[in-house]
């Protein structure tokens, strides 16, 4: 349990990893090589224990829906998310820890809403500040 | 007959004498040094960097059976450590307290009872003070156990028993024979207002060859909130949605939770 946490700490994603670790296996996500994608939100569920976001993304392999997982609803709100800030149909720029096996999807690290608000899980402090 | 009457009278007099005292205690509440009420988070000094990952703990002093169960559990969870809360199940003791501060934890403190609520799963513990609580034969064996408190000066000493088997505690697994003793003390602090010092020792004759301990420090949560944490609601709503679809299609309403439970994955 502690080994992956220590490995993640080396990437500078300490808090993100700590919180991911709080609930969930982070082993399938590659926090060392985050990447930023742009797309259109198809569905969003900011719920516990884990948020889900379905985003339509076009890259050199074509257009498809990527299913992203993220922190708990609590941590989303602490990281700057406000109720209703992301809706189906919104354009979104999202930074994720991709799947280690290279498949579509990943763990949400941060994103920018259509109104320009940045929600950054990597800088979330459990104090709520 | 007469003696019984007198005894009853004496008993009633005692109850009558006790009642106003207890009411007074409850109304007076706790002195500040013994009142842990509030929402707390992990302590960090304003100057220093946030606490990094904790060093790997020394190997647990497990018995052969404890070691076997620990290894089996690790294998069940896989690399990276899946855990109960990821499936909307409360952590239980001692993992709830070992995790507290990662998410905020609330203390509601009355003279006769301390109620502790951890944000994750809204997990709740009740610490009963002497003269209050549940008789032993009525205590459910549960993940949180049953907790009794007493004061040693301004230190609250809490003994927790009646836990069910906690082989799936990701902090310190334990058997149903485990006993946890916790010590809570509130210390004034110039910078953050107060620090809640916490020390826990668990003894378990079945899975351990020696007691295990951990310490934590918490501070009041500033400019933040403890939030509701509803975790199983989504599955329920999906079940309703599936049944509504059947109803509207004129089909028998047969959808089961197992048809929609993938929400947890």
Image: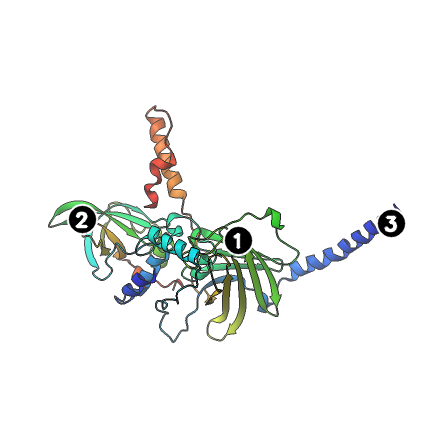
Q: Secondary structure at mark 1?
A: loop
Name the residue tied to disc 3. B3
What residue appears at the point 59 percent right and 60 percent down from the top-left corner? B149
Instruction: From the top left corner, tell me how far across and down residue A6 is, in percent.
Output: 30, 65
Above or below for B28 versus B263: below
Going by the picture, which residue comes out furthest to the left? Answer: A60
Name the chain letter of the residue that bears numbered label 1: B
The image quadrant of residue A1 is bottom left
Instruction: Give the side of residue A60 with respect to residue A25, left or right.
Output: left
Tell me whether circle 1 and circle 2 mark residues in contact (CB < 8 Å). Answer: no
Name the chain letter of the residue that bears numbered label 3: B
Q: Residues within 10 Å of mark 1 (few under 14, many from 20)?
A: many
Real-space Cα separation, disc 3 to disc 1, in angstroms: 43 Å
Q: Secondary structure at mark 2?
A: strand
Instruction: From the top left corner, tell me how far across and down residue A125 is, in percent.
Output: 36, 64
Instruction: Give the side of residue B26 with respect to residue B97, left or right.
Output: right
Name the residue tied to disc 2. A57
Of the two numbered discs 2 and 3 in the rendering, the one whose residue sits closer to the viewer: 3
Mark with earlier residue (3, 1): 3
* Front-most of residues B244 and A83: B244
Real-space Cα separation, disc 1 to disc 2, in angstroms: 48 Å
Going by the picture, which residue comes out furthest to the front? Answer: B64
Query: Which of the image's four quarters has the N terminus of chain B?
Result: top right
Going by the picture, which residue comes out furthest to the top? Answer: B250
Above or below for A18 versus A106: below
Specify the label residue B145 is tagged with.
Answer: 1
Asked whether the residues under marks 1 and 2 belong to the same chain, the reply is: no
The image quadrant of residue B126 is bottom right
Q: Residues within 10 Å of mark 3 (few under 14, many from 20)?
A: few
């Amino acid at each position: 349990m502690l080994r992956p946490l220590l490995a993640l700490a080396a990437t500078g994603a300490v808090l993100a990893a700590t919180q991911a670790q709080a609930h969930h296996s982070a082993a399938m996500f590659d926090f060392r090589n985050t990447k930023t994608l742009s797309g259109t939100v198809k569905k969003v569920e900011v719920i516990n224990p884990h948020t889900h976001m379905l985003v339509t993304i076009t890259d050199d392999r074509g257009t498809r829906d990527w299913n992203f997982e993220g922190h708990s609803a609590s941590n989303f709100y602490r990281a700057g998310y406000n109720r209703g800030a992301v809706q189906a149909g919104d354009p979104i720029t999202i930074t994720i820890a991709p799947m280690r096996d290279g498949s579509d999807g990943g763990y949400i690290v941060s994103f920018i809403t259509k109104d320009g608000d940045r929600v950054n899980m990597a800088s979330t402090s459990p104090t709520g500040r | 007959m007469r003696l019984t009457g007198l005894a009853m009278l004496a008993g009633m007099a005692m109850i009558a004498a006790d009642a106003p005292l207890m009411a007074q205690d409850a109304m007076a509440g706790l002195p500040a040094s013994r009142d842990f009420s509030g929402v707390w988070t992990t302590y960090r000094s304003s100057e220093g960097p946030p606490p990094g990952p904790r060093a790997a703990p020394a190997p647990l002093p497990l018995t052969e059976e404890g070691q076997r169960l620990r290894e089996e559990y690790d294998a069940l969870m896989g690399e990276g450590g899946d855990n109960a809360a990821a499936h909307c199940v409360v952590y239980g003791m001692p993992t709830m307290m070992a995790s507290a501060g990662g998410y905020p934890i609330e203390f509601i403190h009355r003279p006769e009872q301390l109620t502790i609520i951890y944000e994750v799963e809204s997990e709740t513990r009740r610490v009963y003070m002497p003269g209050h609580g549940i008789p032993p034969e009525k205590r459910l064996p549960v993940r949180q156990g049953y907790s009794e408190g007493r004061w040693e000066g301004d230190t609250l000493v809490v003994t927790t028993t009646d836990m069910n088997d906690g082989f799936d505690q990701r902090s310190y697994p334990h058997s149903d024979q485990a006993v946890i003793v916790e010590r809570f003390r509130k210390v004034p602090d110039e910078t953050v207002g107060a620090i809640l010092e916490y020390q826990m020792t668990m003894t378990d004759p079945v899975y351990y060859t020696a007691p295990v301990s951990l310490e934590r420090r918490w501070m009041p949560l500033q400019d933040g909130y403890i939030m509701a944490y509803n975790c199983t609601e989504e599955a329920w709503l999906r079940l309703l949605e599936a049944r509504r679809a059947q109803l509207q299609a004129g089909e028998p309403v047969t959808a089961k939770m197992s048809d929609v439970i993938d929400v947890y994955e």
